[in-house]
Amino acid sequence: MKASYFEIIDTIQSEFSCRFSEFDMSLIESLRVLSPASNCFLEKEKLQPLYSLVNSATKNISEDLLNAETTTVKSVVSSKLPDVFLNENTRMNLDQFLKWFWKYKAAFATVYLMLSAGLTVGVSTATCEASFSSVVRMAYSHLIAGA
């Protein structure tokens, strides 16, 4: 009984370590900078983890082009997007912003790709979350059965 308890604790601890790694936390920060209401909207340094992830999959994103586009997109957004959507309390979510940004897709294809990739991160973590929930349920059931 004691051995399986420690095995379950080790599994949960391992899952936490993978889930909250330094890269994961920097990726979450990358997602935050995709919001036009963010005070660090499209900052190159904070966008780097998402760029690395997307570029490893596509192999065709120029970092120079991304840097140029982000600079221009910041000014386009600040001049074209109504102020109400830049306010912290009434801001658009990423999906709404991507729909608004659609008309600029041809001009800013790299930024559009980054925004689209940002929307998929939540979906791609769903399997991990489901697995983690299963581990917790199994651990709880095992502890109840042993009591």
Image (cartoon, rainbow, N blue to C red):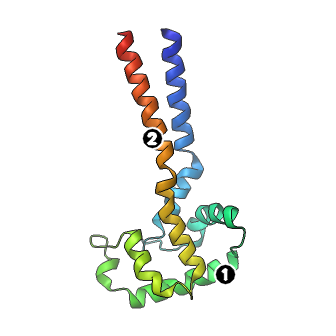
Q: Which of marks 1 and 2 is nearer the N terminus?
A: 1
- At which x and y percent is residue 141? 38, 21
Disc 1 from disc 2: Cα separation? 37 Å
- At which x and y percent is residue 35? 43, 71
Among all residues in the image, which is located at the extreme bottom?
79
Q: At label 2, which amino acid type do we have?
A: Ala
Q: Name the residue under label 2.
A: 130
Identify the residue shown where x is 58% and y is 63%. Answer: 50
Check the picture and name the quadrant holding the C terminus.
Answer: top left
Left or right, 120 with respect to 48, comes to left
- At which x and y percent is residue 132? 47, 36
Which image quadrant is residue 64 in? bottom right
Q: Mark 1 points at which residue?
A: 65
Element type where label 2 sits in the image = helix
| Residue 147 or residue 30, whichever sits in front | 147
| Residue 35 or residue 106, whichever sits in front | 106
